[in-house]
Amino acid sequence: MIALFKGLGILLRDNELYSSPFDKQVAHWRNLSEQQIRDEVAVLAQAKCQWLIASIVGWQAASLLILGLIANYLWRDDFHITFTRVVVVFGSWVSILFVIWFMANMFDQQAGFERWMKAFNSRARISSKADSVEHVAEALDLAEHYPEVLDYKQAVTAKRELRHEDIRIMTEIGRMKQHSELVGRLNHVGENEHLHDLTLQPAY
């Protein structure tokens, strides 16, 4: 169970990291070593198995407990089985399970199956399954055009292999630089024509 708590700790740290400023995310992944990533992946793999077992056991225990409580409430005075009582038990049980499922689905985004997969994918090596040709080509193009993207790539590859998250970060850095470039060009477009028109206006 120690691995489970360590794995949940990694997920919570990732959640905090993804909600933090982009510069902090860049610094975190730039400083990660190959051994650190391997250790985290090993812990996550072990913790995920324990989490799946605990989730199945917990779900079954909760559903049976709820069913027992409903049945005990309806049959506390007598033990006559009627169609109405069976419908009430079944309907109440399904409704409560739906509420539990809805809460679990919300939890899933923070520390559930979806979050485990995101943690694994972000630490995965670059591959054709995880990273499409278009994404890799975009990262390459941005690295060739913007020194900031190339600096990040070189800082990372000096310590370890590029990961899926590195592609995302390189792309985001490049898009931010590209956005600033385009905004600058947009702000200055047409200024020469405007100045030329002003010089041609007659003085009165």
Image (tube, rainbow, N blue to C red):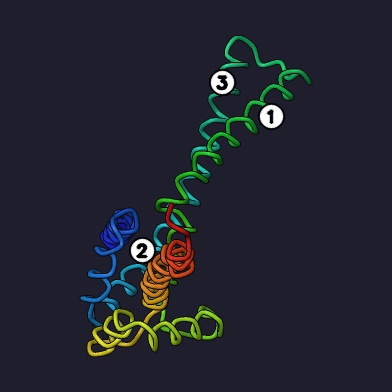
Look at label 1 and name its amino acid. Answer: Phe
Residue 68 in the image: state x and y as whole percent.
55, 28
> Label 1, label 3: how many angstroms apart (C-alpha)?
13 Å
Relative to 75, residue 23 above or below: below
Quarter-of-image position of residue 1: bottom left
Q: Earlier in the sequence, mark 2 or mark 1?
A: 2
Most foreground residue, 8 or 194 = 194
Q: Nearer the viewer, mark 3 or mark 2?
A: 2
Q: Nearer the viewer, mark 2 or mark 1?
A: 2
Residue 52 in the image: state x and y as whole percent.
46, 58
Q: Around disc 2, counting alpha carbons within 10 Å, would you say few (fewer than 14), some (14 to 19), or many (20 or more)?
A: many
Judged from the image, the secondary structure of the residue bearing numbered disc 2 is: helix
Residue 136 in the image: state x and y as whole percent.
49, 84
Most foreground residue, 204 or 23 = 204
Read off the residue under disc 3.
72
Read off the residue under disc 2.
47
